[in-house]
Structures are given as structure tokens and as C-alpha cells.
Amino acid sequence: MSKSPNRSRRFLPKDVIIIHEDRDIIVVEKPSGLLTIANEADQTKTLYYMITDYVRKGNPKSAYRIYIVHRLDKHTSGIIVFAKTPEAKKYLQENWEDFDKHYLAVIGGTMKDKTGILESYLTENKAFNVYSTEDTTLGKLAKTHYRVITETKRCSMLDITLLTGRKNQIRVQFADIFRQVVGDKKYGSITVKYQRLCLHSYCLSFTHPYTKKPVSYTTTIPEFIKVLIGDLDGLQLVEEIKQD
């Protein structure tokens, strides 16, 4: 595996952070409010567009490009990995379900069970709202493991592991049990009001597509979580998550 390229970062917005880059992958921390890929309304204000521009060093005619492996919701922040070759993309997508994907979420209220698994079948209506259904032929199975890290009288911080990867999975399943993710304007944050969605892709561990060795990338605890929960020891939290 080659070393990270010595590439100018002047083509990146200040709030987009590159965590790791080598010849096969680029790992990025996405800010809240930024689309991962384009939709009909917005073709250029996306993380994919910005990272492509960065890889091409601002030259739109360059042959260099990146490949989508997965995505985060627009208002979810945190770690995303892009592939830099078709082979890397194919490997990562084919093995995606086997990789560890940890999120930090702040929910309204407290959980009676401090660890557990939420399980339901999810489907989507014509308005693009995801919801749980008892019809197993209509929905796709979604499983979410959670563990309470700390809690206050108003809210709780959870370490969440996706056991499946469905659209809006975390947000919908916690809304189903009336423990909405704080700041969720789509699925309703009725307990605690906040200006942003309090959901962050915190730790991503996978097998590198070239070296076939395990790699793991983490972010620090975001400021919005510290504001709601209080100051936290990031290193201790990383150790707790990795021990699971």
C-alpha cells in the first residue's frame, strides 16, 4: 500500500476533514448538512463532488476519480470511505456487511435496557419517509445494536452498531420506541430540541481492499455531543467501543 499522496488541500472546504488517504481508499469526515452524492435538486454541493475535485487537484478533465462505497444521510456527520479504484470499490461493497460501523447518537430520555438490539422491517412510502411494517414481504429486515455510554435527566448518549444497513435505520427504529434522535426534524425529536441531528458516524473498521489487513478509523467526540452530555474523554470512549 502506497503512502498518502502529498496533495494540496486548498480544493477542500475547511469543514471537510481527510482522515486517511492512500492509493486505494480515501477516508473522510463529513460535516452535517452536506449530501454524500447528488440528487435532483443539488448536483455540486456534495461530498462526492468535493472529494473528486480534490483528487483531481481542481482539474475537471483529469482522469482521476473516486468511487462511492456507501453514504450517510445529509444531516448525519462522520466517517465515510471512498474507493479510488474499481477493484477497491468492488471489494468494499461485497464485504460491507462484515465490517464494523459505530455511531454516536444522542436520544431524548433514557433507556430502560442499557444494551440491546432493535429489530424491525423497514419500507418507504411515496413521500420518501421510511417506516416500520409488520409485513415481512414489504419491508427489509433492519437490526441495530445499542449500548448506553452515559445519560443525563434529559437525554442519553449511545454507541450504536449497524447490524444491517437500511435507509434512516437508526432514526426510524428509535422513533418507534419514542426515543427519537435529538434534532431529528424528519422523524420527530419531541423530547429535546436542538439545531442539528445528533447522529455521528464515529468509528469504521474494515479489511483494507489491497493489503487485506484490518484497519480502523475514528473521530473525536463532536462538540455538539459535548454540549448536550458534558465534557467526555475521547480516548476512554474509543477503548470502550473496541472492547465490545
Image: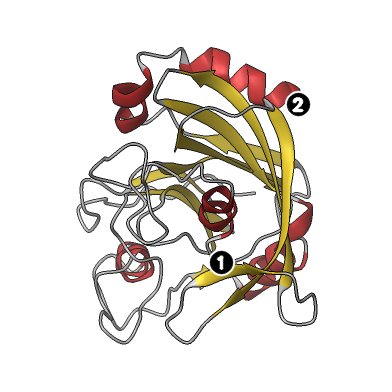
The color scheme shown is secondary structure
Write down the quadrant of residue 146 in the picture: top right
What percent of the width, then of the height, locates residue 124? 56, 78
**Looking at the image, how many numbered discs can be counted on the residues?**
2
Q: Is residue 165 in view from this perspective?
A: yes
In the picture shown, does residue 24 fall above or below 156? below
What percent of the width, then of the height, locates residue 132? 63, 66
Under mark 2, the amino acid is Asp
What percent of the width, then of the height, locates residue 241? 65, 26
User: Pointer 1: what residue?
Assistant: 167
User: Pointer 2: what residue?
Assistant: 244
Write down the quadrant of residue 97 in the picture: bottom right
Residues 86 and 231: in front is: 231
Please name the residue shown 75% across and 26% down the image. 244
Under mark 1, the amino acid is Lys
SS for callout 2: loop
Please name the residue shown 33% across and 52% down the image. 7
Q: Is residue 73 left or right of residue 112?
A: left
Please name the residue shown 21% across and 53% down the image. 13
Mark 2 or mark 1, which is nearer to you? 1
Q: Residues within 10 Å of mark 1 (few under 14, many from 20)?
A: some
Please name the residue shown 53% across and 70% down the image. 130
Q: Residues within 10 Å of mark 2 (few under 14, many from 20)?
A: few
What percent of the width, then of the height, locates residue 156? 48, 27
Along the polypeptide, which appears first: circle 2 or circle 1?
Answer: 1
Residues 52 and 29: in front is: 29
Residues 161 and 58: in front is: 161
In the picture shown, does residue 220 fall above or below 195? above
In the picture shown, does residue 239 fall above or below 82? above
Q: Is residue 221 left or right of residue 101?
A: left
